[in-house]
Image (cartoon, rainbow, N blue to C red):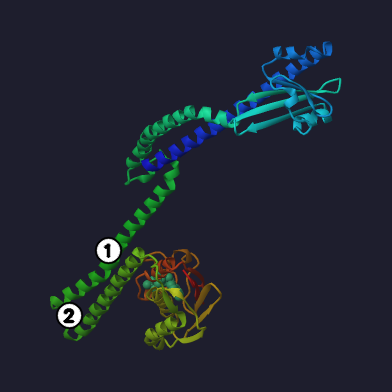
Amino acid sequence: MEKKIRKNMMTVSVIIALITYIACSLTLYWTMMISLDREIKSISVQIASYLADDKNALNSLSIFSESRITLINEDGTVFFDSIKDSATLENHLNRPEVVNAFKKGEGRSLRFSTSLDSQTYYYAVLLSDGIVLRIASETQSLNNIFLSGLIVTGTVMILLLITAVFFSKKLTQNIIRPINQIDFNDPLSNTTYPEIRPLLENFERHEKMRKEFSANVSHELKTPLTSISGYAEIMANGLVKEEDIPLFSQKIYDESRNLFHKIEDIIRISRLDESHLPAQLEDVNYRTVIESVLGHLDQQIQTKQIHVQTVLMNVTGKGIISVVEEILYNLIENAVKYNKDHGSISIKLYDDAQKIYIEIQDTGIGIAKEDLPRIYERFYRSDKSHSQKVEGSGLGLSIVKHGLALLNGEIHVESELGKGTTFRVIFKKKP
Ligand code: ADP
């Protein structure tokens, strides 16, 4: 964290120093050029009035300024230059400032001499007698201004970076201290950072669910174990008549199988909780999976004389076969378990370009409206619909939900008490 804060502070410091440096250099250059222009212009006014009085006083023009002063005839020939011999100078009619002076009364231009690494500012004005007066002054170029500010900016930048290192350490300590002081027995009592409240709420919710799960597991396992040990104790004390022994043994057998199923479900759900989607997914043939699940449930289907109707397209997608099997087994098993004798189940399987749709519809006991939002909770079993008479752990739909979360799938349910239930599952072809 300290590293990240330090890096961010350093980056921000460098950016601020650079922006300040560029802004200052540009402002300096801009102000310098404006004042130079103003100065040259006022000199040109003085020279113009001086020349109006005495046209021959050319040689004393240098008293007005150290800048180069040039006078140009209408045809572009130079007839006076304060620095060079006017006879050696070429025609000036093509100089932009001169062109503009003849055209508009005044003209400016800026020329950069790479050989001298200097910049000259030219100002030209048309005088009343048709000649052009040009004043040229060397100025600092923008490059020079940038370069001259480099040492100061560099020093400021180093100072800022040192400050950033120092402050990032202090800042990190100040930010981290309240986080380390969070009381995880009562996370929401922490009020220092409202920004981390969602995280703490999440933590508290998970903690509550974990505690509830442990309490539920203990309770769910204790119930069949109490029955088993109760029956066994009665038998051990010789309180059971000879002819009742098979009945009691059967009860012990049933309860231990019930216990076994619950433990299996708990292991499954814990495994799904810890699973992550593997990088390499298997090819899942959904029709094959549904047919295999129906095969496994055949005996229960026959016992209840349930009519199963399927419309299954040959659909494949990427996934984890064992997880898809687990999801569909739990849903179809519920459709059988919570069905009425002679009831029916309809299973449809189809797809589109990206998704696979499975619809499992039964004509069973249905689920009460108020129970619907809770059926995916661990150990939740609805009793409004008399489903408690059916053997189960209340973990089946929770396994379904966890499996679908792992495969990025969805589940929707519609149900009417006494009429039946429809579960719609959507798998992604490429989760
Ligand atoms: P269980 O082991 O009790 O079947 P599940 O998690 O699979 O646990 O289901 C939770 C509850 O949802 C069940 O106890 C039952 O009340 C209800 N339920 C699930 N599927 C159906 C269904 N097809 N028809 C009626 N009720 C259902």
In the image, the residue with mark 1 has its CB under 8 Å from the nearest atom of ligand 1? no
Q: Is residue 347 left or right of residue 205?
A: right
Q: Is residue 221 left or right of residue 170?
A: left
Q: Is residue 239 left or right of residue 95?
A: left
The numbered mark at residue 47 is none
For the point 48% across and 66% down, the residue is 372
Kind of residue at disc 2: Val
Of residue 83 and residue 288, the one placed in the foreground of this image is 83
Looking at the picture, does residue 386 appear above or below residue 74?
below
User: Which residue is labeled 1 in the image?
Assistant: 218
Kind of residue at disc 1: Ser
Q: CA distance from mark 1 to mark 2?
A: 29 Å
Local crowd size for mark 2, using a 10 Å CA cut-off: few (<14), some (14–19), many (≥20): some
* SS for callout 1: helix
Q: Position of residue 236 (x, y in %)?
A: 13, 76
Specify the farthest residue to the right. 129
* SS for callout 2: loop
- Which image quarter: residue 261? bottom left
Specify the farthest residue to the left. 237
For the point 37% across and 84% down, the residue is 296
The quadrant in which the N terminus is found is top left
Give the mark toward the camera: 1 or 2.
1
Label count reads: 2
The quadrant where ligand 1 appears is bottom left
User: Which residue is labeled 2 in the image?
Assistant: 240
